[in-house]
Image (cartoon, coloured by chain):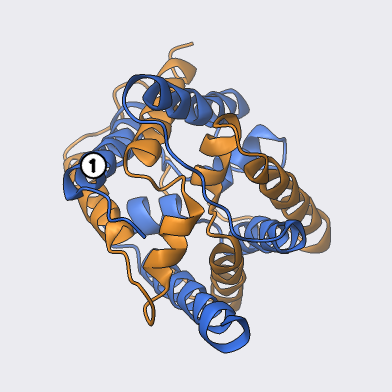
Amino acid sequence: MEPLSPLAALSGGLLIGTATALFLLLNGRIAGVSGMAATALGMGGATPRGQAAAFVIGLPAGALLVAWLIRSPTVVVTSSPVLLIVAGLLVGFGTRLGSGCTSGHGVCGIARLSPRSLLATATFMAAGAITVFLLRHVWGG
Amino acid sequence: MREWLPAVVVGILFGAGLVLSDMVNPARVQAFLDVAGDWDPTLALVMGAALVPSALAYWLRRRLERPLLAERFAIPENRSLDGRLLAGAALFGIGWGLAGFCPGPALSSIVLGAWQPLLFVAAMVAGMIVHRFAVPELRLA
């Protein structure tokens, strides 16, 4: 696939990191998307529900803002609807069972050197890579 | 008000960063996970850049008695590397590899015109609900 300019990748990453930094220093909390999505839907969690909902609503709002002002992304999905449903179920269930996803474990957890997050990140990266390998190079073609 | 306003700003920055860095594009995420194929380094750059402000904030946190807008820091103290963490991270990783979506990019991209993120998010919420009813809650601070 066409490479993205490293500048876009780095500036996007800095924005994401700044978001998590602000959430910690202002609100004192971890900016974990899966946890806050669950909390926003009333499924427990440590964050007050209003804050969690505000964060979750902010995500697509920020996406729209960049899509209008800077770059409109192409969302290329190759998975079939059935695969999307299976994947969604696994991501929803797995992130709750494992207490986090790419943001809470991957960005916030690694930044604070949490052993749980380091292990979780290594595990979901490896599981993701193995899955793509099987999908593309073993079963696919 | 005091706490949800920063939460929505943090969400907006996060969503903006995900679009800017093309992480809302599942094809690019899967290309990062495809280590045996046409590998795309973008996700590593994004995560590396995100870790810089995030790690700075967690370092700064140790010098702060409390967050600027809240009573206290609410950071998970759990350090046990247990089966739930591993199993959850592994299931999440499989789902992530299958579709190329994790929770943040999926929620951010529901407004970008493609229908697939909506289907994925619906299944993800269903997976969270399954977890809610199938797995007894652990009370961890």
Residue for point 41% across, 57% down:
B28
Q: Which chain is blue?
A: A
| Residue type marked 1 | Ala
Quadrant holding the C terminus of chain A: bottom right
| Residue reaching furthest to the top | B1
Where residue B103 appears, as percent x and y from the top left, is 55, 48
- Of residues A8 and A55, the one nearer the viewer is A8
Q: Is residue B78 visible?
A: no
The residue labelled by disc 1 is: A8
Q: Which chain is orange?
A: B
Does residue A46 sit above or below A48 in this rendering?
below
Q: Quadrant of residue A114?
A: bottom left
Where residue A123 appears, as percent x and y from the top left, is 46, 75
Where residue B125 appears, as percent x and y from the top left, is 72, 46
* Side (left or right) of A33 relative to A140: left
| Residue reaching furthest to the bottom | A138
Q: Quadrant of residue B89?
A: bottom right
Residue for point 41% across, 27% down:
A67
Element on which disc 1 rests = helix
* Side (left or right) of B49 relative to B137: left
